[in-house]
Image (cartoon, rainbow, N blue to C red):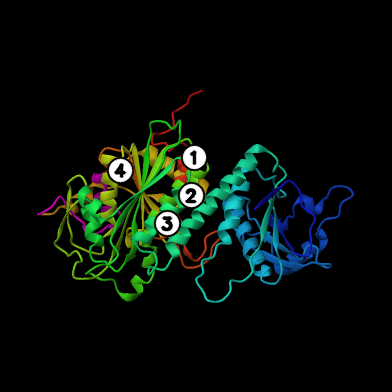
Amino acid sequence: MELLAALPDLGEDDVLAVPVGAGGALPPWLTSPAPGTAPPVPAELLAGALADTGNTGKAGGITNLPVPGRRPRSVVAVGTGDGTLPHLRSFVATAVRRAQTLAEHGAGRLVLPLDTALASAGADEVRAAVEAALLAGYRFRESSRPHPPRLATVAVVATDAAGPAVAAAARAGEVTARAVAWARDLVNTPPDTGDPAWLAQQAVDRLGGLPHVTVTVLGPGELAAGGFGGVLAVGGGSASPPRLVVAAYDPPGAGASHPVLVGKGITYDTGGLQIKHGPGMRDMKTDMAGGAAVLAAVEAAARLELPVRVTAVVPAAENAVSGSSYRPADVIRHVGGRTTEVQNTDAEGRLVLADGLAHARLHLRATALVDVATLTGAMKVALGARTAGLYATTDGLADALSTAALHAGERVWRMPLDEEYAPQLASEVADATNAPGNPGGTTAALFLRPFAGDLPWAHLDVAGPARAGSDDAEVVKGGTGFGARTLLRWLEAGAPVDPPPVTTD
C-alpha cells in the first residue's frame, strides 16, 4: 500500500480507478486539472464511455476503458453511489477486483484516487479504502498450479495524505486488514490441517512475539485440572485433543478495565453422535470463526499499541464421532461448577463458550465480556447471511458495540434477551439443558448468560456473516473474518460499557 497526496506519473503497468458520482459526475482532478497539466484520460472520452455503458454512478457500476498510448494501461471508472463509507468500500473493492484481473496480463499497480466531486477524502475515507483494498484482494489457495500474478501495489491518493491523522488512518487500515486476513486464513484452512493443536500454535507463532502480548495454551491435562468440562466433553470424541488459547495484551499504562473476548474455536463440527447431514457439514471448518476473530482483534490492538488491556480466550475442540464421544443425557460440569444436561451433541458451541466465559470471569479478572460465535442456524434464518445478532446485558455495551460495528462496516442487529424463554432451559438433573428449543438464538444466549455472572456481557452470533458464498464489496467467498473489525473499533474507543454522559446546554 502507498499513500500519495497527488496522482503519480502513470505508466504502462498502471490501472487508474476513477470515482464516478451520482449522475455520472467525474472528479475535479479530471474535469478541471491544474493549469499546465493534462488529465490522464480526456474527460469527454470517459463521459462518453459512461453514457455508452449506462454507468450513472450507481454504487458498484463499472466501465472499463483502454487508454491510447497505454499510459495508464487502463482506466476503470466505478460508481460511488451517494458517497457513504459503504459505497466507498464498494468502489474500492470493485476497482481492486478488476485490477487484479488485469494483473494477470501485466498490470502491476492500481492507482486509487479517493477525492470526488463532492469532497476530499479524510481519515475515515482513507482507512476504509485501505481496508477494502487489501481485503477485496484476499484469496486463499492450496493448489498445485502456480498462483496467478497479483498486483504489486495499490496507491491510495488523497489530497490530505500528508496530514498526520490521514497517515495514521492509513496505517490503522493496513494493520486491521492484515489481521482480518489472518483470521480468514485460520477459518479457510482445511480441517485436516486446522485442528485444535494447530490453531493454538498459529496463535503462539503470530502473537507470541508482539510487545506486551503473552500467549498461554492449556492442554487436556490442564483443562481437566481446571474443570473445563464443556471443552473436554465436546473434544473427547476426536483424535485431536482440545486446547484453550489465552492471548493477553497488557501494555504499560493501561487502565483498570480488562475486557475479555471469548471466541468459539470448534475447528470442525460433525455434530457429534447426533451427526449432521452431509450438506450441513461441508462448511464446518469455519465453525471456529469466532475464535479467529477475537485473536485477530488482539493482534491488531497490539500492533496499533492501543492503551487498553485485552485478552482473547479461545476454547478449541473438534466435535467428532467415536466411542469416546459425549452423549445425549450426559451431565457436564463447567468451570465454576455449573452443570449442563446434554440434549443435543450438535449444540456444542455454547458448551465450550460457557467454560471460556466462566474462566475469564473467575480467573482472568475480566471487567467486561464479549463472546463471538457461529452459534445458531436460527440467527441466520432471522437476520440473513450478512448481519450478526447482538445480545447484551447493558444498553451501554450494546450501543458501544453497535457504534463500533457501524464504523467498521459490519452489520449487527440487537436481539432481545427475553426472560419469558428462560424456563425452557430447565433440567431435572442439572442447572440447565443445552438444547432449550426455539427461538434458538435467544435461548442460546440465555444459556450463556449465567456464565458471565454480573459482568457486562455481550454475545455476537455470527452464524450468517462469518462465511460468504460469493464476493461482495470487501467480503470474499469463504471465511470473512467478521467481528474482528467491530471488536477492534470498540477497543479503540476504550472498550466502553456505560452509556455516554448526557449533556445539556
Marks 2/1: CA distance? 10 Å
Quadrant in the rendering for residue 360: top left
Q: Amino acid at mark 1?
A: Glu
Whichever of labels 1 and 4 marks the residue nearer the N terminus, that label is 4
* Discs 1/4, front: 4
- SS state under label 1: helix
Q: Nearer the viewer, residue 23 or 187?
A: 187
CA neighbours of label 1 inside 10 A, class few (<14), some (14 to 19), many (20+): some
Whichever of labels 2 and 1 marks the residue nearer the N terminus, that label is 2
Marks 3/4: CA distance? 21 Å
Instruction: Identify the residue under disc 3.
Output: 202
Instruction: Identify the residue under disc 2.
Output: 485
* Discs 3/1, front: 3
- SS state under label 4: helix
Q: Residue at x 28, y 61 (%)?
A: 241
**Farthest right residue?**
36
What's the magenta region?
429-451
Q: Amino acid at mark 4?
A: Ala
Marks 2/3: CA distance? 20 Å
* Discs 3/4, front: 3
Whether tag 2 and tag 1 are in contact, CB under 8 A, the answer is: no
The vertical placement of 92 against 5, above or below, is below
Q: Amino acid at mark 2?
A: Arg
Marks 3/1: CA distance? 25 Å
Instruction: Identify the residue under disc 1.
Output: 492
CA neighbours of label 3 inside 10 A, class few (<14), some (14 to 19), many (20+): some
The x and y percentages for residue 68 are 83, 68
Q: Amino acid at mark 3?
A: Gln
Whether tag 4 and tag 2 are in contact, CB under 8 A, the answer is: no
Q: Nearer the viewer, residue 81 or 473?
A: 473
The x and y percentages for residue 362 are 25, 40
Instruction: Identify the residue under disc 4.
Output: 360
